[in-house]
Image (spheres, grey):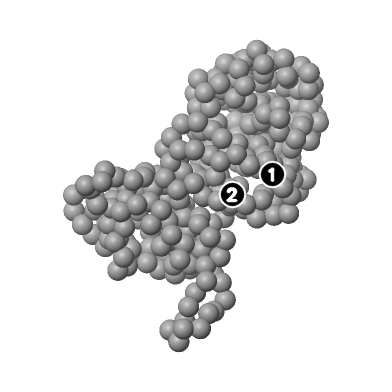
Amino acid sequence: MVVPKLRRVAALCCVVACGGSGSPLPAASPSGANPAQRIEVPGPLVADAVPAAVQITSHAGARVAPAEPGWLGVGLSGRAADQPGVLISSVLRRSPAAVGGLQVGDIVLGIDDARVNKPEELSRLIAQKGAGHRASLMLERERQQRLLAVQMGQNPGLEGQLKLGFLDAPAPEFERVEVARGDVGPTLQALRGRVVVLEFWATWCGACRALLPTLNGWHERYQAGGALVLSITTDPVAKAARDAVELGLEYPVLSDPDGATAQLYQAFALPTVFLIDQAGVVRHVSVGYDPKQIAELEATLERLVSAI
């Protein structure tokens, strides 16, 4: 699987490696000015992010202005050497691929006149098409071949992809987490009826430490109104509990030692914050430490708490 090149993130954040496979979202490449600690994310990721810009040649042979790379929002997996094409392993909700009718399990045999047999080949061709351009994909679906015309989109970056995939949809249930600190059940279902501010964090993440006072303030201000600030870290229980005390976290902390829940929420950059309403639906997603995003998140939090 192709691992997209990570650029710098607009909000201060730390990009992390999460275990597991079959991710429906990529470790994408939003642009910005602040440096972020980078660790490449393993496993099958969503493809389509190759160069920062695509140089186009006109029919006359002259170079024209670079275009934004094409992007579909699909996860790609290779097939056996004797099997043609590239398998679509995931389709991001509301992405160009989803709008165009691509499905998990489709086998892409070619794009326009070019045959493909490797994920990186298909990723490169998608990028070269450029955002806004259409391409004809030759597919095999349920052992039948068909032709599908799909319009390429522009990669919205990691936060944008999280919003496409999660906003206004039910939040995933937690998997294999343990309580490290606080009196809270280790399931999202147990929190139904409360507004949940769910943060993915790590002790080594400087942006997480910058966000900590804000989350402590929300914990103090909104818990009486039915809100809960909850953090999840991939550290083991004992370390998570010790670090929470040393850093002064006043809200509950869950340990996600094998990264199963972080994988479900595609928390590839830290901090990633999900705001989940009392019915368990995601109403806001924020990546990194960005004062503007924090203000927007708090405004949504106040609105949801006032509606309880």
Element at badge 1?
Answer: loop
**Residue beneath the point at 43% across and 59% down:** 124
**Residue beneath the point at 63% across and 42% down:** 38
Q: Is residue 47 visible?
A: yes
Q: Quadrant of residue 280?
A: top right
The residue pinned by badge 2 equals: 6
Q: Specify the amino acid type for callout 2.
A: Leu
Q: Residues within 10 Å of mark 2 (few under 14, many from 20)?
A: many
Q: Quadrant of the C terminus?
A: top right
Q: Quadrant of residue 43?
A: top left
**Residue beneath the point at 56% across and 22% down:** 256
**Do the CB atoms of the residues marked 1 and 2 lie less than 8 Å apart?**
yes
Q: Residue furthest left?
A: 143
The residue pinned by badge 1 equals: 36
Q: Is 296 drawn above or below residue 110 in the view shown? A: above
Along the line of sight, the residue nearer the viewer: 187 or 45: 45
Task: Classify residue 3 as left or right of residue 229.
Answer: left
> Which x, y percent locates residue 147?
26, 62
Q: Is 165 drawn above or below residue 276 in the view shown? A: below
Q: Specify the amino acid type for callout 1.
A: Ala
